[in-house]
Image (tube, helix red, strand yellow):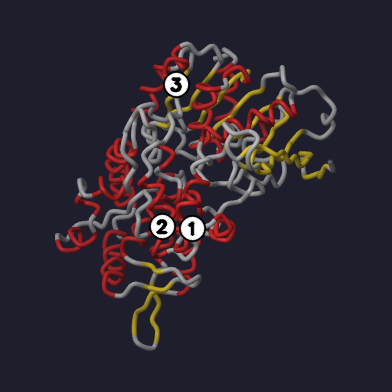
Amino acid sequence: MSADRLPGVVVTDHFLEVPLDHAAPDGERLTVYGREAVAPGREHEALPWLVYLQGGPGCASPRPLGRDSWLVRALDHYRVLLLDQRGTGRSAPAGRQTLALRGGPREQAAYLAHFRADAIVRDAESFRRELAGPGERWSVLGQSFGGFCATTYLSYAPEGLREVMITGGLPGLRAGAEDVYRAAYPRVARKNAAHYARYPQDIERVRRIAAHLREHPARLPGGGRLTAEAFQALGRLLGTGTGSYVLHYLIEDAWVTGPAGPELAETFLQAVQSHLSHTATPLYAVLHEAIYAQRSVASKGTGWAAQHVRAEFPEFDVGTALEGGRPVHFTGEMVYPWLFDTDPALRPLKETAQALAERADWPDLYDADRLAANEVPAAAAVYADDMYVDAAHSLETAREIRGLRTWVTNEWEHDGLRVSDGAVLDRLIRMVRGEV
């Protein structure tokens, strides 16, 4: 193995073969990847391992440019493994190109059913035994969906854990997909209200764009189709610390005057595409509702829960808003079936996504009894104003995990771990070690 030196960090590649289905270890195998990061000069020290589980689903682990972000703090204490969860990055990447090799939609869906948190935890356990040693425990840091995975880890493989730190990612143990979205729409509505209070001029700007797109859907530079509903999906920006500002600047540059009069600017369409395209994260869309599916919670499939529940919140309907003279609400990180028509990266996966939405035999991801008997030191940052993960669900789960300590804060948004220069991680480390 060769090591690369970046400013303030030494990184080393690790590849490991694991079963596609950990319940069938002699069957098909996948290659999963993790990038080790350690402080220069400490490469040969017996440092404790910390495995980082990224948010998502379907997002590769961050690619460090140096000792930045939360690594500033982590490398003081740990040897870090940045794990590409299966299907992402360099770990058997799954998208329209590679999934075409699996056969038809049913075969693709059966394959992707092995790409949820339970399989990710088993992959991490394989890496732990390989890198730390069979009898050694390691620490886990889970962000967002990575926190969901960490909760699954506590449920099914706590014997491998020294300590667990979760940031913006405590799942509802018994919250099905419909429960998740029924709680999400009011949170997103509050983020809309806060954005329009900050930028009241955006109310008419957004209405103008939405009205135009209802009559004249735009073609994005990469071949995607920008409808009014797709435009609403830019609201996913509102869940980050700077997202409202980014959205505002995007909206204010939407129009130019062309030969035929006002038209949507190419620069605007290019920027919109960069925020909406799932070319780099197809599994985010394909598996998004499946991460909430458990047979003990709901015996039916997820059935496009975000779309179904949306009907209960008419304030998110573009036509109703325009006709009633009200602000057009942006949506959040909901995934809708029409997305597989408007995004070229997802069109070939439309039937695969439908098959996953119909699937009903999902195994449970959490063991409430085992969590109630937990002995692993654990701490979680719960963001009071989190748009993506419901704080009430998180705190309910926190009460069910024995010994887990929570830090409820509105100092940071969902991306607090990434943007706080180590402050969030520092607090979690001190909490899990009983120092605060």
Q: Residues within 10 Å of mark 1 (few under 14, many from 20)?
A: few
Q: Please state which amino acid type lies under the numbered disc 1.
A: Gly
State the residue at coordinates (73%, 37%).
Answer: 36
Q: Earlier in the sequence, mark 1 or mark 2?
A: 1
Q: Earlier in the sequence, mark 3 or mark 2?
A: 2
Q: Indicate the position of residue 19 as horizontal and vertical percent values.
A: 63, 37
Name the residue that disc number 1 marks: 104
Point out which mark residue 174 bears. Answer: none
Q: Please state which amino acid type lies under the numbered disc 3.
A: Asp
Q: Can you say which quadrant of the picture contains the N terminus?
A: top right
Measured in 3D between alpha carbons, the distance from the residue under mark 1 to the one under mark 2, in whole angstroms, is 9 Å
Is residue 260 in sight in this rendering? yes
Q: Quadrant of residue 77?
A: top right
State the residue at coordinates (63%, 20%).
Answer: 160
Name the residue that disc number 2 marks: 351
Q: Indicate the position of residue 334 as horizontal and vertical percent values.
A: 37, 48
Q: Please state which amino acid type lies under the numbered disc 2.
A: Glu
- The mark tally for this picture is 3
Instruction: Label 1, secondary structure: give it.
Output: loop
Q: Do the residues under discs 1 and 2 have CB atoms within 8 angstroms?
A: yes
